[in-house]
Image (cartoon, rainbow, N blue to C red):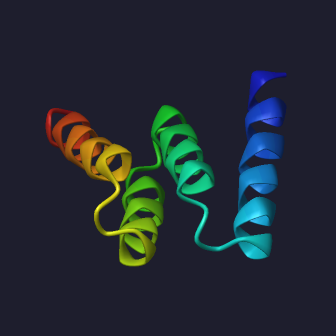
Amino acid sequence: MQEEESAKAVEAFKASLKLEPDFPEASYNLALLGALLGNQHFSLDVIARALKAAPEDANLLRLRKNLHTMFTSL
């Protein structure tokens, strides 16, 4: 059941980014969800695209750092 809910959440965040591509909060949450699902490349790609739109966003920068730390320690 949790996998089904996670898949629905991924689709919802992707849909929100199609409507508003420069919405850093959606990118942040989508990257977090990808990390929780263990999808390193997806998470880092989402953050990279979000930082192109909002390069000074402190939350995105912090999440990128934390994702790199998390995935390199695995």
Q: Depth check: 10 or 54 in front?
A: 54
Q: Position of residue 42 (x, y in %)?
A: 48, 60
Q: Residue at x 31, y 69 (%)?
A: 55
Q: Is residue 53 above or below residue 69?
A: below
Q: Is residue 14 above or below residue 61?
A: below
What residue occupies the far top of the structure in this picture? 1
Q: Is residue 38 above or below residue 45?
A: above
Q: Residue at x 50, y 48 (%)?
A: 28
Q: Residue at x 45, y 40 (%)?
A: 35
Q: Is residue 3 above or below residue 2?
A: below
Q: Residue at x 26, y 42 (%)?
A: 62
Q: How many marks?
A: 0
Q: Position of residue 48 (x, y in %)?
A: 36, 69
Q: Depth check: 60 or 36 in front?
A: 60
Q: Depth check: 31 or 51 in front?
A: 51
Q: Position of residue 36 (x, y in %)?
A: 50, 32
Which quarter of the rendering shows the N terminus?
A: top right
Which quarter of the rendering shows the C terminus?
A: top left
In this rendering, position of residue 71 left or right of residue 20: left
Task: State the image quarter where residue 3 is shown.
Answer: top right
